[in-house]
Amino acid sequence: MGLWLLGLAITGSVLGWFWSTTLTLVRDENSALTAEQLWLAAIGPAALVAAVALVVAGVSLFLRGRAPFVLAVSAAVIMTVAIALQPGLGLNLLPVVGLLAALAARSQRPRRTPVAQPA
């Protein structure tokens, strides 16, 4: 859960930073696009794909068996697609890919079952 929350925090802060920077720095009266439209055109598709990756990873936390591994690996691949859609996000979101891969590796770890203690 901690790896997923950290990935969620990183992704949210990166996309929020890009949003606030776009609103602050893009002020061209001659442009056909507003700052919000520019962000949606440039970052929007990658942000949507990154959100899907985090939802898939979040779902993997509540499943058992082989499904968490498959979903976590899928989430890492989907996040890589988000980076490919907007290479400018690459350096910022690449650690999230590593966190999702670690989540996949952690899901393969055998779970300890408590041993009943004799009374």
Image (tube, rainbow, N blue to C red):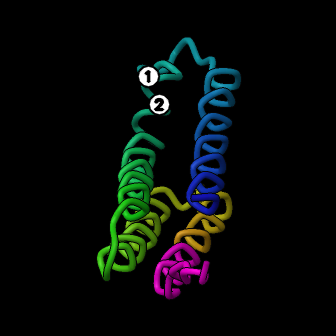
25, 78: nearer the viewer: 78
Q: Is residue 52 left or right of residue 8?
A: left
Q: How many marks?
A: 2
| Residue hosting label 1 | 33
Q: Amino acid at mark 2?
A: Leu
Residue 68: quarter of image: bottom left
8, 61: nearer the viewer: 61
Characterize the magenta stretch by its predominant secondary structure. Answer: loop
Extreme residue toward the top, this view:
29
Please name the residue shown 36% across and 57% down the image: 59
Q: Residue 89, how many percent across, how many down?
A: 59, 56
Q: Residue 114, how many percent across, how many down?
A: 55, 78
Q: Amino acid at mark 1?
A: Leu
Extreme residue toward the front, this view:
119
Please name the residue shown 38% across and 45% down the image: 48
Q: Earlier in the sequence, mark 1 or mark 2?
A: 1
63, 114: nearer the viewer: 114
Instruction: Write down the region rendered in magenta.
Output: 101-119
Please name the residue shown 31% across and 82% down the image: 66
| Residue hosting label 2 | 38
Q: Are marks 1 and 2 in contact (CB under 8 Å)?
A: yes
The local secondary structure at tag 2 comes to helix
Reply above or below: 10 against 28: below
C-alpha separation, residue under disc 1 versus residue under disc 2: 6 Å
In the rendered image, residue 105 lying in the magenta stretch gets the answer: yes
